[in-house]
Image (cartoon, grey):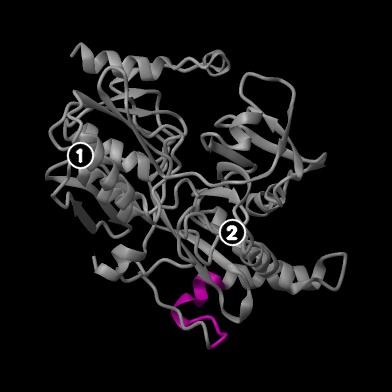
Amino acid sequence: MSSNKFLKITLISVFVIILMAGSFGGGFLAGYYTPFGTLGLPNSGFTPSATIDVTSGDTPQDLQPLFKPFWESWQILHDQYVDQPLDDSALMKGAIIGMMQSLGDEHSSYMDPQEYSDANTSLSGEYEGIGAWVDTTGQYLTVVSPMKGSPAEKAGLLSGDEIRAIDGADMTDINPVLVRLKVIGPAGTKVRLSVSREGHDELIDIDIVREKIIVPSVIGEITQDNLAYITLTTFGDTTSADLHITLKDIMAQNPDGLILDLRNNGGGYLKTAIEVASEFIGDGVILYEQYGDGTRDTYNAQGGGLATEIPMVVLVNEGSASASEIVAGAIQDLGRASLVGVTTYGKGSVQNWVPLSDDQGAIRVTIAKWLTPEGRTIHKLGLTPDIIVERTEMDYNNETDPQFDAAVDLLLNP
């Protein structure tokens, strides 16, 4: 893989996007597709099975038999459908939508020109919103995890909540990417989210006051048990450098063990994930990235990590996604540390947004999947912790943390 591709490509983090109007730590560049991403990812590097000259406007000779039923259907509709004239543009968009849906991949889709334009021009504000990572690939905008200390967390938004209505307006059949834009807004303003939550028959109304959100990507401290406790909230521009500085300070205090908290971390840059994992893994494969033709790119630990020998435990939960799963999966597969918590989100694919010619929108295409060092796929499965410990809604309300307590006990009583 070229260094240019390595620098630019991002794990889409559950197609996870922070609910803010604009940049976050300088990493939210000219697109809304990833939490810290660029507008388009590089080509995957392999040659497609068929190349079409899209400039000619004609169906290529070798594809004419394949497309014959399409053009026959097109003509039948124009000749026989009761309500004429037909909207040819709508027919073509519908054909593209159907083609993308036929893949059976919820991460590959089509966005029409207006949606594509709206989504790109609405992200140039300040860091204001509710502070949550969301999944825009399903039928409804779904919360992956609220950010720690954010308005979303304080209001009680939980991982897995589906946003069905905003301020009383039904969001059914509205592109989740655009639903996200309705949630963000100026600090001080209120938004009411009606969410569907597992275990509840009725929608739950949650009122959230938007804020200007500034969240450090790395938080480190020494606990009363002389354990290093490091929380990563995202994998952004400065995370690697911030983590290195934090580790240098904490390791100088000679802690007896280390807890790495990746709970509710929705992911970020692939490059950052490799750098973070390398702080805890001395050598070996961190992950494989596998393309549609079966070829792989291999990412190895970079060496020079500051915490490759200290006993450690990694905390994960249902909000740990994408880059978090890369780090946790590598640590688990290589036997570096145990995972404690509950099964992670399960996002292990890479998407590329490709604008269509003549401003006709864009399609999002899954170009690769990533695998752990042992070749495990995480996509739709997640990582199963070595030690399963739930943290219930009651625990949150009582501000108790049995997952953290289990990690401490594991380090103090190995």
Image height of 154 relative to 234, above or below = above
Give the magenta part as a residue range.
56-67
Residue 52 in percent (x, y) is at 45, 79
Is residue 242 rendered to the left or right of residue 76?
left
Pointer 1 local density, CA inside 10 Å: few below 14, some 14–19, many at least 20: many
Nearer the observer, 169 or 207: 207
Residue 131 in percent (x, y) is at 58, 42
Q: Can the viewer see residue 301?
A: yes
Type of amino acid at the residue the image marks with label 2: Gly
- Which residue lies at the image location 17% right of the left edge and 46% below the top edge? 285
Q: Report, in whole angstroms, how far the alpha carbon at label 2 lies from the one at label 1.
A: 32 Å
Q: Which residue is mark 1?
A: 280
Is residue 84 rendered to the left or right of residue 226?
right
- Which residue lies at the image location 57% right of the left edge and 72% below the top edge? 68
Type of amino acid at the residue the image marks with label 1: Phe
Image height of 340 relative to 131, above or below = above
Residue 395 in percent (x, y) is at 52, 14
Q: Which residue is mark 2?
A: 22
Which of the marked residues, 2 or 1, is nearer the chain's N terminus? 2
Disc 2 element:
loop
Whether residue 20 is in magenta: the answer is no
Q: Can the viewer see residue 375?
A: no
Disc 1 element:
helix
- Which residue lies at the image location 25% right of the left edge and 15% below the top edge? 410
Dot label at residue 182: none
Whether residue 63 is in magenta: the answer is yes
Pointer 2 local density, CA inside 10 Å: few below 14, some 14–19, many at least 20: many
Nearer the observer, 99 or 2: 2
Image height of 381 relative to 371, above or below = above
